[in-house]
Amino acid sequence: MRVLITGAAGFLGSHLCEKLINNGHEVIGMDNFLTGDPQNIAHLSGNPAFSFIRHDVSNFIFVPGKLDAVMHFASPASPNKNSPYGYPNLPIQTMKAGALGTHNALGISKANRAIFLLASTSEIYGDPKEHPQKESYWGHVDPTGPRSMYDEAKRFAEALTMSYHRFHGINTHIVRIFNTFGPRMRLDDGRVIPNFIQQALRKEPLTIYGEGKQTRSFCFVEDLVEGIYRLLLSDTHEPVNIGNPFEMTMMELAAVINSMTNNTSGLVYHEAARLGDDPERRQPDITKAKNLLDWEPKYSLEQGLEITIPYFKQKLGIA
Ligand code: NAD
Ligand code: UDP
């Protein structure tokens, strides 16, 4: 297949480019480097199966030649209000990537009668009242809250994707991605795993936002891209959760990372750094992915961290 991947220079996009190329496909990466990094795809330049177009997906998308699939991953993704790369500091770009970007990506899919896959998110469940979260849950989201630029853009993107499927008959897929980590996350986008690993490697206390009792469930990137690849090739049009159901508190996560890095500086509490409407609990129900895609994660948190920590060490120049 000839596949367009938007957000190709980002964390997930760059791993997807590799996954598709390794499975024999041709990839056209697209990105405007808003939160991504050209370094993430530098190793692919010169590969005949890869080409790159620098472009903002909020504007009309043109790609020469026939496309077989479009995977729309372009969007800021970090909720950290203290990072210049966090979506609270890029509110208009975030809404445009989710709304106009999704419209343009669906438009080029339709013009090519290409498969379309949307990168949606567990954030569409908001601060959930149902636990764990099944795809049938409608969510608990404040449409004007501090996370609304991201959550509502993704909810609109899901609705638009289903509209193109139902009205235009496009073969669409929606993946609801739960917290994922691995090499090529930005050191400075403020998400919890890069923050904790980098603080631990510098022998600093880890910054816990709030009391640290809030939970997340972390999936290693290798597992995630395998699930997304299976969804792309499936005949499922309804949203599918992809994530690791192993749930833990941020205190527990901090303890694991401090232990794996031999950091004895402990923790520091930063209530003010926490973004409003921060979900208290998050855990995917992956029954649908198991049944429809025969997929489940293989990496434990520790196995994923054993690969991710050396990546951050190298980035920070720590021997
Ligand atoms: P990322 O910030 O590393 O990657 C996003 C990429 O999109 C960046 O390279 C950025 O430059 C690019 N981009 C942003 N706006 C753009 C625009 N207007 N035009 C072209 N490119 C643009 O983030 P990520 O973690 O790789 O997330 C990728 C996608 O997956 C996002 O859509 C995000 O919402 C979704 N997602 C990620 C996670 C996760 O845990 N990583 C969880 C849920 C959903
Ligand atoms: N968090 C934290 N310390 C940090 C960064 C984040 O305690 O240095 C918390 C944050 O408040 C949230 C959780 O870790 O409860 C996960 O945050 P992240 O930014 O990774 O993504 P989210 O799951 O909120 O989208």
Image (tube, helix red, strand yellow):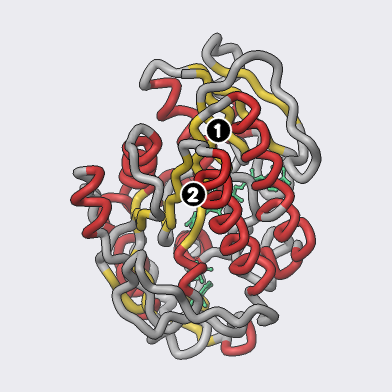
Contact (CB < 8 A) between labels 1 and 2? Answer: no
Residue drawn at (74%, 32%), measured in percent from left and top? 61
Label 1 residue SS: strand
Residue drawn at (59%, 68%), measured in percent from left and top? 151
Q: Which residue is mark 2?
A: 312
Mark closer to the observer (1, 2) = 1
User: As displayed, is residue 94 above or below residue 210?
Assistant: above
Q: Is residue 319 visible?
A: no
Q: Is residue 105 visible?
A: yes
Disc sitting over residue 56 in the figure: none
Residue drawn at (35%, 32%), measured in percent from left and top? 233
For this rendering, which residue is in front, 9 or 307? 9
Residue drawn at (35%, 41%), measured in percent from left and top? 231
For marks 1 and 2, the one nearer the N-term is 1
| Count of labels in the image | 2
User: As displayed, is residue 269 above or below residue 148?
Assistant: below
Q: Amino acid at mark 1?
A: Val
For this rendering, which residue is in front, 1 or 254? 1
Residue 127 percent coordinates (x, y) = 47, 81
For this rendering, which residue is in front, 198 or 7? 7
Residue 216 percent coordinates (x, y) = 38, 71
Label 2 residue SS: helix
Q: Is residue 261 left or right of 27 when viewed as pictured? A: left
Q: Amino acid at mark 2?
A: Phe
**How busy is the neighbourhood of tag 1: few (under 14 within 10 Å), some, or many (20 plus)?**
many
**How busy is the neighbourhood of tag 2: few (under 14 within 10 Å), some, or many (20 plus)?**
many
Q: Which residue is mark 1?
A: 70
Residue 7 percent coordinates (x, y) = 62, 41
Q: CA distance from mark 1 to mark 2?
A: 30 Å
